[in-house]
Amino acid sequence: MKKRSFALFLLLCASSTFSADLHYSLIKKESGKTNESTLLVIGGIHGDEPGGYFAPMLLAKHYTIQKGNVWIVPNLNFDSIVKNRRGTYGDMNRKFAKIETKDKDFEIVSDIKKLILDPKVDLTLNLHDGQGFYRAKNIDKNFNPKAWGQATIIDQQKIPDAKYGNLAEIAKKVNQETNVDLIEDVHEFNVKNTNTKDKDKAMQQSLTYFSITNNKPAFAIETSKNITDLSHKVFYQLKTIEKFMKVMNIEFTRSFELEEKVIEELLKDVGMLEIPPTKIMLNLSTLKPSIRFFPINKADFHYHSENPLVAIIHDKNEYKIMNGNKLISTLKADMMEFDNSLNEINLLLDGKKSTAKVGTLIQAREHFEIAPIQGYRINIIGYSKEGVLSEEGIKVEPSVLMKSYAIDKEETTYMVHFYKDKKFCGMVNIQFIQH
Ligand SMILES: [Zn+2]
């Protein structure tokens, strides 16, 4: 087995006039062998369909590919995902037949088209949450031929001469297998053929039809918007993706059991956020919904997270940390100049001499004490003592700290800021752990 590590760097840059603010990420998981199939999974073309982007995020994070290749774009329409809107600049899935160069989606649509047409890609899946529950016959307002949910969508029966070109047959086989273990019987998947070429003008502008007209198989997977539990939607999306992998002879292992409860837990793990070069590290899974006095360098602000759904949206002096369409925390910015000269500090952790890199998260049981640093001022957020300018050489226990200044929901983690004159030099965050 060949293991591949991957790292993702998300950069928030000033947007150029004709492109979206956030570009998608591409995660390639490859077995490293030649002549094996490649599946391209695209999530998040519609920003208000979270099943379609949290599933590929877990696929990217928790799956190892042992045979074949899986390329994952979990966040195609990232600007719309963080706003929880179908399409901030209009419906992206209606821009694949033609798009004007001045369209804000132009760059993303052009880039993803190139990826779909990459000779290595054998099959593309476009993930959605659709309205209702698709049924071939009309049952009621939720179960009918016009609904989109719980369906594998094809544009036509087949693409002659293409590898995996028997679209209808593949979709049917995949659904049969997905339908073996349903959370509820009404969640069954069915194949919806939109007969795009003859019958569906709107779908002629879609991503999958673009692929089909280029002789490359593509399917849409639609879980239902009527299923309210995100973990259930993600369960069905992952299950269906796995069945497609099976069809394509792609072998994988995953680090968890595919069950709704397990998925629910995995979705709570948002990961870490790093703000370089100012040396700040935050645990997004435990962060408070709002944090005051957060130093921000307006001149040079960027960040990275290994979670491809994490983005920071800036509005005046507020910085909103998003995990997909979920707001994790709002940082109330303290705008200031930054200085990058401090790398390491000395401290006592529970009385023991220790060093810590600036920008790390460290743990203490009972108390900590920051050693003086020549030329720098230390500010423990949540601690104050009259007449003390630099909070060094002070034994700090949880009882002397104001809990409202803690940065995590459990109120056990506090920021220690370092300054040189008035410039901010980074922070360490100290968490008091239970003993
Ligand atoms: Zn959609």
Image: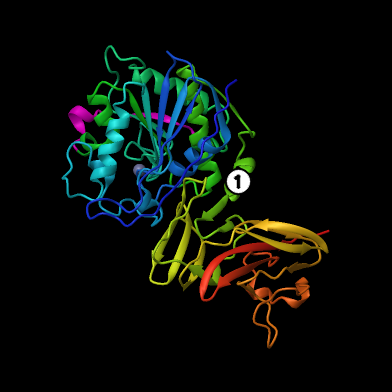
**Residue lying furthest bottom in this view?**
386
Quarter of the figure with residue 379: bottom right
On screen, 262 above or below 371? above
* Mark 1 element type: helix
* Percent coordinates x, y for residue 256 in the rendering: 64, 34
Q: Write down which quadrant ligand 1 falls in.
A: top left
* Percent coordinates x, y for residue 365 in the rendering: 80, 61
Q: In this view, does 324 lie to the left or right of 61?
A: left
Q: In this view, does 342 lie to the left or right of 310?
A: right
Q: In the rendered structure, does residue 197 fall within the stretch colored magenta? A: yes
Bounds of the magenta span? 188-201
Task: Report which residue position mark 1 lands on.
Answer: 264
Question: What colour-coding does the image apply?
Answer: rainbow
Quarter of the figure with residue 71: top left
Look at 65% across and 62% down and name the residue there. Answer: 429
What kind of residue is marked 1? Glu
